[in-house]
Image: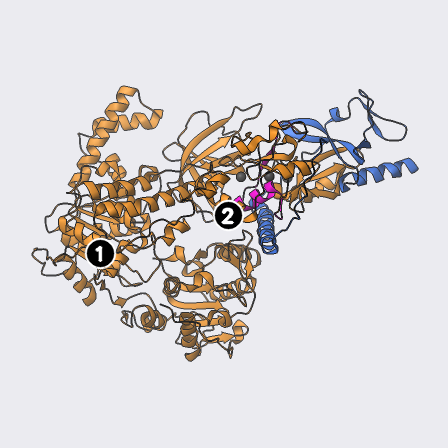
Amino acid sequence: EETGDDEGYEYSKGDFMEHACRYCGVQNPACVVRCNVPSCRKWFCNSRGNTSGSHIVNHLVRAKHKEVCLHKDSPLGETILECYNCGCRNVFILGFISAKTESVVVLLCREPCLNLNSLKDMNWDLSQWCPLIDDRCFLQWLVKVPSETEQLRARQISAQQINKVEELWKTNPDATLEDLEKPGVDDEPQPVAIKYEDAYQYQNVFAPLIKLEADYDKMMKESQSKDNLTIRWDIGLNKKRVAYFVFPKEDNELRLVPGDELRLRYSGDPAHPAWQSVGHVIKLTAQEEVALELRASQGVPVDLNHGFSVDFVWKSTSFDRMQGAMKNFAVDETSVSGYIYHHLLGHEVEMQMVRNALPRRFGAPGLPELNASQVFAVKSVLQRPISLIQGPPGTGKTVTSAALVYHMAKQGQGQVLVCAPSNVAVDQLAEKISATGLKVVRLCAKSREAVSSPVEHLTLHYQVRHLDTSEKSELHKLQQLKDEQGELSSSDEKKYKALKRATEREISQSADVICCTCVGAGDPRLANFRFRQVLIDESTQSTEPECLIPLVLGAKQVVLVGDHCQLGPVIMCKKAARAGLAQSLFERLVLLGVKPIRLQVQYRMHPSLSEFPSNNFYEGTLQNGVTINERQSTGIDFPWPVPNRPMFFYVQMGQEEISASGTSYLNRTEAANVEKIVTTFLRSGVVPSQIGVITPYEGQRAYIVNYMSRNGALRQQLYKDIEVASVDSFQGREKDYIILSCVRSNEHQGIGFLNDPRRLNVALTRARYGIVILGNPKVLSKQPLWNGLLTHYKEHECLVEGPLNNLKQSMVQFQKPKKMYN
Amino acid sequence: NDEIHVRQKVMLVDPEEEAEFDREFRALMQESLESRKLELRARPTLNMMIPMNVFEGSTRDHHGRVSEGESGDEAIDYESGGRKEVRVKVLVKRGSKQQTKHMLIPSDSSLVQSTKQQEAAELEE
Ligand SMILES: [Zn+2]
Ligand SMILES: [Zn+2]
Ligand SMILES: [Zn+2]
């Protein structure tokens, strides 16, 4: 027989009290706290069960959540734990202090409040700061540990189960432990294939993968709430309110991009009502300051600067458009031509030629002359319904694409659609195509209209506003009224929208070429447009369904430009990536036997720098379009070990460390030497904008930025102006001088990110004049490709060690490479 | 017999799990500290005065101890289930308003040790 109050323990029936521990079911109000992260709000108890931390601490650590709220029936009542002085709610740095003479205690944060000098003079005893979380448990007198009986009645949950359910919550916050046992949760999705029976089978494979990625993306973004932000207010040129604030980015989080939607909140105080407004990010400064243009114009608490919170507003638009494109591909026979349809699905189709008259010359007005491989590419592509152009680094794929688009537009098949996954690439291409004299419209997402663009004059929204005809006068008047008043009467608003839509349509229809991102091709403003000819640049960086969006608008001739020897699309959800979502359409077509036309002359790198990438990634076919003389850095006095070879591998033996987030790495020795190299470059006459520091790890990136700004030998601003970025984010870009910090240096573990040959290719091909690589040869040489690189540097006497002003050839022994890389 | 006796399973924490958890825990702690150092450009102003009403109605008795006038309860040393506990006031803020809550904490907590020592010292004077 059991004693007394049993009702409270009937969690086995499945209906929990709301405040029951989500791990074990304990629901004594004195023993539980609620996670205060808005997207979470789950309750956990303070018992350890058979894990090394208490359930609440386990959850906070696994989910990387940091705020909690006490139960209303606890001794302190419903209270969010926060620093008494500054309001910081991060429980990992909170602790109690007591008054020196009274029995009064408060919570205080360890940084900075506990270290405030002025506090020392007050009546508080700072020597006995008592952390809120002690021995991986909340202070037991604040949150009671369930009694032994309570614990015995509770569900016994293992650390593995905790990890699994936390993983599950990332995509399904309402999942229960029972869901772990349900079939399907742990199942891997059906992997991608090379060939598909039909478009329905295609959709059946890709739709679940896109769903997985969308769910993951949603969870990631919605968990990015930040509190206690300080706001600086401003007014934009369009008279809209702009809020500036620092959005501290943590290691494993996504970076904000212009156009992202955020919700700014103020929870209210006796003098101010609670307030919130949604806005779009219009700018990000190098110091990670965000400019948010607010939708609200009235009631903004501009007299306040502190205590704001911000949440990410997730939009499903891009994923919806991918799903929509796959559906169209399946159900609408006119979405693509028969030939394209069968070819994309991998069916055997007889080779078809496009019957078009070829132009006499293949260059285009306003563009540089084309070289032989570029001419060959243009000529071949114009005759084929589907083609792949591979553009290795610096081989002029934008110019080639622009020339191609010029000739396609001149064939009289209607408007040409030009896309790329990223806005930056679309802008570059739009600019080049416009230089040929074609009429270009750059269609931007509505959320990005306030984001500044180098091709603003080509954007549709700009052209609508600046259309110089008499018909627009009505629209113009209404626009002015709207700008001044912020809104229109409902009848005027209706009229304004209709006029705007008609004008947009008119301008778009008169263009030769429409440029937008792949996702942008699904914009409702293009719904009634048909494009027979489509070119997609950077196509190896987009997923298949993303690529499909511009294709299903009637494509008969498709050109995919990219380089499958560089990095592919970023897939956040590991399950979807494992199933093959990271493989681009370009790559699958290569597997199906379509031979890419390769551009072969590179105009970026000093010939010494292109040698290794050419031999190892492009079968030695990369030719140099620049001479050694053209890449001689005149007037720069830098200690290259071999004067006419501006490259060296700087041997580093410092240990790697796990970064603060626990998900990334850093290497202090390498960071310190990066600073020395940067300083030497600057002293020798190189300016900051010529230097790029790249590293595969976000942890190291952040550490280098911080280290240089604190320890740089020269003026601080010089270091702030130097771009420090991840290898991945540097794809598609170049700098005169590149410093690559490899980071990984350990006895037994692998080299992680560096293992991907495509990442090494990208890292090695960013520099125009010179490259310095910092790394540990003992560790890196285990991998065959790195072993090859090290041998290459050693053979050219460019493997060195010692101080920068006295570099000596290194005699370090390489390890035997483990296995051949595929 | 009303009581039930269930033998407690011997708790076995997987050392590998423990090490991994500990690593993540420390990483989160370190990251929290470092991000605070970075994000706070201006140090916050001090706002830590103990509001007068906390002492209202409480008087110092001749031993230098604080006692509450209303209930007459002594501020320290409750006996609860064999464990000595101390009653403390916890100050919290609701928006900009201060509130006082009462709580019992173990008297051997380092948090109240110094108060007691101080009081002891005062007593000796
Ligand atoms: Zn949580
Ligand atoms: Zn629990
Ligand atoms: Zn504080």
Q: Residue at x 47, y 73 (%)?
A: A639
Q: Residue at x 51, y 79 (%)?
A: A811
Q: Nearer the viewer, residue A99 or A10?
A: A10
Q: Is residue A479 above or below residue A627?
A: above
Q: Nearer the viewer, residue A290 or A456?
A: A290
Which segment is the magenta one?
A: A51-74
The hue of chain A in the figure is orange
What kind of residue is marked 1? Ser
Residue B109 percent location from the top left of the image = 76, 40
Q: Is residue A137 left or right of residue A553?
A: right
Q: Chain of mark 2?
A: A
Q: Residues within 10 Å of mark 1 (few under 14, many from 20)?
A: many
Q: Which mark is residue A250?
A: 2
Residue A73 falls within the magenta-colored stretch: yes
Tag 2 secondary structure: loop
Residue A534 falls within the magenta-colored stretch: no
Q: Is residue A430 above or below residue A677?
A: above
